[in-house]
Image (cartoon, grey):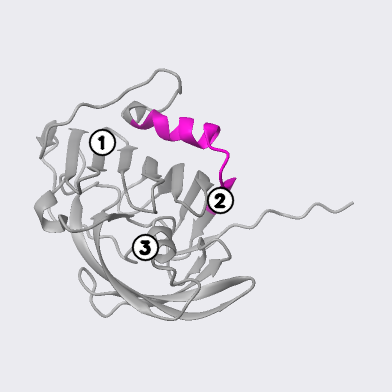
C-alpha cells in the first residue's frame, strides 16, 4: 500500500449508493460475518476447504500511529484468500473488516470491506471479472467527515491488483506474481487503491524493485509513482513474500516464545 492515506473532501452524512456497474451479490448464511461482508463468505469457505498452501494467521502493528491488523489466510504458490480486521484511530477511530480473494495467480477477484465507527458505517464491494472489468458497489450510512466511498472504475480499468490503505497484506500480490522477491528486476503496476477508513477508490501508480534475497526472505523497494510521488520504502519480506517490516508503516508481530 501507499504509506499515506489521502483524506480530502467530506461526506454529507446521507445514505449513498453508487452502482458503477450492476452485479448481483452472492450471499451465504453458512458463515457468520459482520453486516455487509456476507457477500464474500465464500472466501472464508475457501480458506477452510483448500488444502493447498499454508493456512495461517498473521498480525501487524502500526509504526507511524496506533493501528493493528490481523488476517487469517490461505497462501499458496497459486494465490491467496484472506479475511481480516484492521483497527485504527486516525483520521477517526474505526474498525475495518475485509475479505480478499486473489486465489488465481495473485490477481484480484474481489475485495469486500466494511468500515465502521461511532455513528457511521461504510461498505465497498470491489470486484474484477475474469474478462478484466472492475465494478465497485459502495454505500455510506451515518455522519462522518470523510470522502465518499467508491470511485470511478474507469481510472484503474487496466489494473489487476487492489491495494488496501494502511495494510501490509496487499503488497504481497504484485510481488509474488512478478517474482521480485526471488530474482532481480523491477516492474511498474497500476493499482485500485482503497483509502481507509473512507473506502474511496482511486488509481495508484507504483513500482517494485528487487533489492536482495536470502534463504530467510528478501527486501523489495516500493516506489510511489502516483498518489505520493517520491515516497520510497525498502520492504522486508519473509520467505513467503509477506511483509515483516514496512518502514514508517507497520511491522509483523511475532508470537512470544514459551519458556519451560
Question: Furthest-right residue in view?
Answer: 260
Give the x, y percent position of residue 132: 20, 49
Secondary structure at badge 1 equals strand
Magenta region, residue range? 40-59
Count of number-bearing discs: 3
Q: Residue at x 47, y 34 (%)?
A: 46
Relative to 25, is 10 above or below? below
Task: Give whichever of discs 2 and 3 has the lower sequence position.
Answer: 2
Circle 3 residue: 174
Q: Residue at x 43, y 70 (%)?
A: 248
Q: Is residue 55 left or right of residue 110?
A: right
Q: Is residue 3 left or right of residue 75?
A: left
Task: Give whichever of discs 2 and 1 has the lower sequence position.
Answer: 2
Q: Residue at x 51, y 57 (%)?
A: 61
Task: Give whichever of discs 3 and 1 has the lower sequence position.
Answer: 1
Identify the image quadrant of residue 149: top left
Whole-angstrom CA distance, mark 2 to mark 3, is 19 Å
Number of residues whose C-alpha sits closer than 10 Å to that of mark 3, classed few (under 14), some (14–19) or many (20 or more): many
- Mark closer to the observer (3, 1): 3
- Mark closer to the observer (2, 3): 3
Circle 2 residue: 58
Q: Nearer the viewer, residue 49 or 164?
A: 49
Whole-angstrom CA distance, mark 2 to mark 1, is 24 Å
Circle 1 residue: 123
Identify the image quadrant of residue 173: bottom left
Give the x, y percent position of residue 150: 17, 44
Q: Is residue 225 left or right of residue 213?
A: left
Whole-angstrom CA distance, mark 3 to mark 1, is 25 Å
Give the x, y percent position of residue 79: 44, 51
Amino acid at each position: 500500500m501507499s504509506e499515506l492515506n489521502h483524506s480530502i473532501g467530506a461526506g454529507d452524512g446521507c445514505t449513498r449508493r453508487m452502482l458503477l456497474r450492476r452485479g448481483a451479490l452472492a450471499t451465504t448464511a453458512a458463515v457468520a460475518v459482520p453486516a455487509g461482508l456476507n457477500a464474500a463468505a465464500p472466501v472464508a469457505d475457501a480458506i477452510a476447504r483448500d488444502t493447498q498452501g499454508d493456512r495461517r494467521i498473521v498480525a501487524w502493528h502500526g509504526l507511524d500511529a496506533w493501528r493493528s491488523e490481523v488476517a487469517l489466510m490461505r497462501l499458496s504458490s497459486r494465490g491467496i484468500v484472506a479475511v481480516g480486521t484492521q483497527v485504527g484511530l486516525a483520521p477517526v477511530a474505526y474498525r475495518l473488516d475485509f475479505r480478499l480473494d486473489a486465489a488465481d495467480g495473485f490477481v484480484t477477484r474481489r475485495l469486500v470491506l466494511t468500515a465502521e465507527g461511532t455513528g457511521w458505517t461504510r461498505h465497498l464491494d470491489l470486484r474484477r471479472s475474469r474478462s478484466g472489468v472492475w465494478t465497485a458497489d459502495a454505500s455510506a450510512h451515518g455522519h462522518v467527515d470523510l470522502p465518499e466511498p467508491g470511485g470511478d472504475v474507469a481510472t484503474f480499468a487496466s489494473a489487476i491488483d487492489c491495494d488496501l490503505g494502511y495494510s501490509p497484506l496487499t503488497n504481497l500480490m504484485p510481488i509474488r506474481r512478478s517474482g521480485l522477491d526471488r530474482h532481480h528486476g523491477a516492474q511498474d503496476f497500476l493499482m485500485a487503491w482503497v483509502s481507509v477508513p473512507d473506502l474511496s477508490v482511486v488509481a495508484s501508480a507504483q513500482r517494485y524493485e528487487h533489492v536482495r534475497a536470502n534463504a530467510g526472505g528478501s527486501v523489495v523497494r516500493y516506489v510511489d509513482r502516483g498518489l505520493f510521488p517520491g515516497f520510497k520504502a525498502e520492504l522486508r519480506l519473509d520467505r513467503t513474500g509477506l511483509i515483516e517490516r514496512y518502514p514508517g508503516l507497520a511491522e509483523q508481530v511475532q508470537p512470544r516464545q514459551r519458556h519451560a
